[in-house]
Image: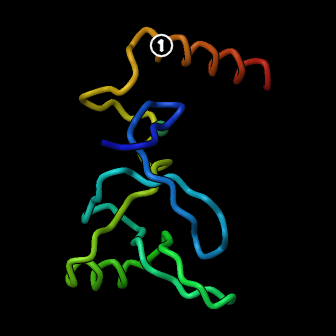
Amino acid sequence: MAEHFCKFCGAPIRWARTPAGRMIPLEDSSDQAKGTFALRVVDLPDGTAKRMAVGLTRHERIEADADGELLFQAHRATCGEERTGTAIPPEIREKANLVIARYQRSSR
Ligand SMILES: [Zn+2]
């Protein structure tokens, strides 16, 4: 069971920090075909090590996949896509979409 859900589309996500210190939402399930991030333990300058979302090049992705490493897609790549098993009820999603649409109109 995922602990976090996207506030826009309700999909299960996992938050991860990048080596640059940014938090990014990743898809909760791995995707070997489309994933561009691997969760790797990165050594930090202060001597500690943390599991982080490391963005991979195409070549690195092929190698990681061959090694059996799980790859994850950034959630923003799939956010808003229709899915089966919606996490939020449709009437709430509809209301959220209205609020977003109103905001987009007023910010133009
Ligand atoms: Zn989303």
- At which x and y percent is residue 73? 39, 58
The crowding category of the residue bearing disc 1, from other C-alpha atoms within 10 Å (few below 14, some 14 to 19, many at least 20), is few
Q: Quadrant of residue 34?
A: bottom left
In the rendered picture of this protein, how many numbered marks are placed on residues? 1
Q: 31 left or right of 78? A: left
Q: Residue at x 27, y 59 (%)?
A: 31
Query: Which of 82 and 89 lies nearest the eye of the viewer?
Result: 89
Q: Quadrant of the C terminus?
A: top right
Q: Residue at x 48, y 69 (%)?
A: 53
- At which x and y percent is residue 41? 45, 80
Task: Report the residue marked by disc 1.
Answer: 92
- At which x and y percent is residue 97? 54, 18
- At which x and y percent is residue 26? 45, 54
Picture layout, residue 94 above or below residue 18: above
Q: Tell me the amino acid under the disc marked 1.
A: Ile
Picture layout, residue 103 above or below residue 23: above
Helix, strand or loop at mark 1:
helix
User: How is the rendered protein coloured?
Assistant: rainbow
Q: Quadrant of the N terminus?
A: top left
Q: Is mark 1 within 8 Å of ligand 1?
A: no
Q: Residue at x 64, y 15 (%)?
A: 99
Q: Residue at x 42, y 78 (%)?
A: 40
Q: Quadrant of residue 17?
A: bottom right
Q: Quadrant of residue 33?
A: bottom left
Query: Which of 42 and 103 lies nearest the eye of the viewer?
Result: 42
Q: 50 left or right of 59? A: right
